[in-house]
Image: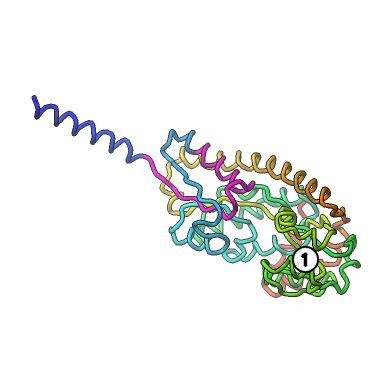
């Protein structure tokens, strides 16, 4: 009787273990704070996948760059150290050169133009190459993020207003060339020192993500915020190609659907965040300036083609993007 009981318990334990073996846990690296629009969208994605697969795919979100961020995180994804990452589309320029066109200033006329690009065969071809050449499966390329703006000590409404401004930029060649072409004087200042640079006159202006302006209090040193939206970028969610290939067809479809649904969720989050940021800035006395982006874009066409000739992205890509209607 005792032996029979032990056998029954053993069989039950083995059965539970076998049932649990079908579940898989995946780690997703998010570079932003847990409450950021990016990580909230990632959590929404993970929750839907877990629900729709009845727990067979359990995606754990690690916020605040705990597992790495930027190019480093994507490298770890490629190597299989990470299972999934959410990162800016422009960061993939380090893996597929054509993505560098995203970080070139004023490449896109407006958000509709950018969204049309993301939905185009042109961009899908880049995703195919990313999988073939880097072993990375991009699940969605169109999660929303806040745009980049210009913060300055005097109003910037047209390119002429940039003439001679000491302009803090990150050490990215396309960024430096963009603002140099527009007439500013690019200067290298560490991000952590940017507020002090604006306050002391080491820099007269800088570009930054919209939400970083109030969080870093840049507007208290430079009270003019121009909505240039000079770089339309997006947040992507990508998976290690080998991990992706091990999912069955039904699981792959659930993951893709959840990634698409999270795009709509992120768009709502970002729209609300933009309103909140503007309210904070204006409440603190900052002046928010709407600009005619076409005036800036017109000055950058020749420089964009020069970047293309230097191999920053494929020949003809910039014109192909401009032809998207």
Q: Residue furthest top?
A: 1
Instruction: Tell me what residue is drawn at x 46 percent, y 40 percent.
Output: 251
Residue situated in front as seen by the camera: 314 or 10: 10
Q: Is 46 inside the magenta-drawn segment?
A: yes
Name which quarter of the figure residue 150 lies in.
bottom right
Residue at (84, 54) in percent of width and height: 286
Give me the residue at 78% from left, 56% from top. 229
Q: Residue 317 colored magenta?
A: no
Left or right: residue 125 versus residue 320 is left
Left/right placement of residue 139 relative to residue 179 reads left
Indicate whether 81 appears above or below 25: below
Does dot 1 land on a helix, a strand or a loop? strand
Specify the color scheme: rainbow
Q: Which portion, as a residue range, is magenta?
A: 23-49
Q: Nearer the viewer, residue 56 or 302?
A: 56
The residue labelled by disc 1 is 206
Q: Is residue 201 left or right of residue 18?
A: right
**Number of numbered discs present?**
1
Vertical side of 138 occupied by 20: above or below: above
């Amino acid at each position: 009787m005792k032996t029979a009981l032990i056998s029954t318990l053993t069989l039950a334990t083995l059965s539970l273990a076998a049932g649990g073996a079908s579940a898989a846990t995946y780690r997703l690296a998010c570079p932003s704070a847990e409450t950021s629009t990016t990580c909230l969208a990632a959590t929404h994605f993970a929750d839907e996948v877990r629900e729709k697969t009845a727990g067979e795919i359990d995606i754990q979100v690690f916020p605040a760059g705990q597992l790495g961020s930027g190019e480093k995180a994507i490298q770890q994804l490629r190597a299989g150290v990470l299972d999934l990452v959410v990162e800016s589309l422009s960061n993939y320029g380090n893996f597929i050169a054509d993505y560098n066109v995203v970080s070139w200033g004023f490449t896109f006329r407006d958000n509709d133009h950018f969204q049309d690009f993301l939905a185009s065969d042109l961009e899908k071809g880049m995703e195919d190459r990313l999988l073939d050449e880097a072993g990375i499966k991009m699940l969605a390329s169109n999660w929303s993020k806040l745009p980049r703006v210009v913060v300055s000590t005097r109003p910037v409404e047209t390119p002429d207003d940039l003439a001679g401004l000491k302009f803090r930029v990150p050490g990215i060649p396309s960024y430096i060339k963009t603002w140099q072409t527009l007439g500013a004087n690019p200067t290298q200042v560490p991000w952590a020192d940017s507020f002090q640079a604006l306050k002391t006159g080491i820099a007269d202006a800088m570009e930054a993500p919209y939400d970083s302006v109030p969080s870093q209090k840049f507007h208290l040193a430079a009270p003019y915020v121009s909505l240039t939206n000079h770089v339309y970028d997006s947040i992507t969610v990508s998976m290690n190609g080998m991990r992706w290939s091990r999912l069955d067809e039904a699981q792959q479809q659930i993951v893709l659907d959840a990634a698409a649904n999270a795009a709509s969720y992120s768009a709502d989050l970002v729209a609300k965040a933009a309103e909140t940021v503007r309210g904070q800035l204006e409440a603190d006395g900052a002046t928010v300036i709407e600009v005619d982006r076409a005036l800036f874009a017109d000055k950058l066409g020749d420089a964009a083609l020069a970047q293309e000739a230097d191999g920053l992205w494929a020949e003809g890509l910039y014109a192909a993007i401009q032809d998207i209607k």
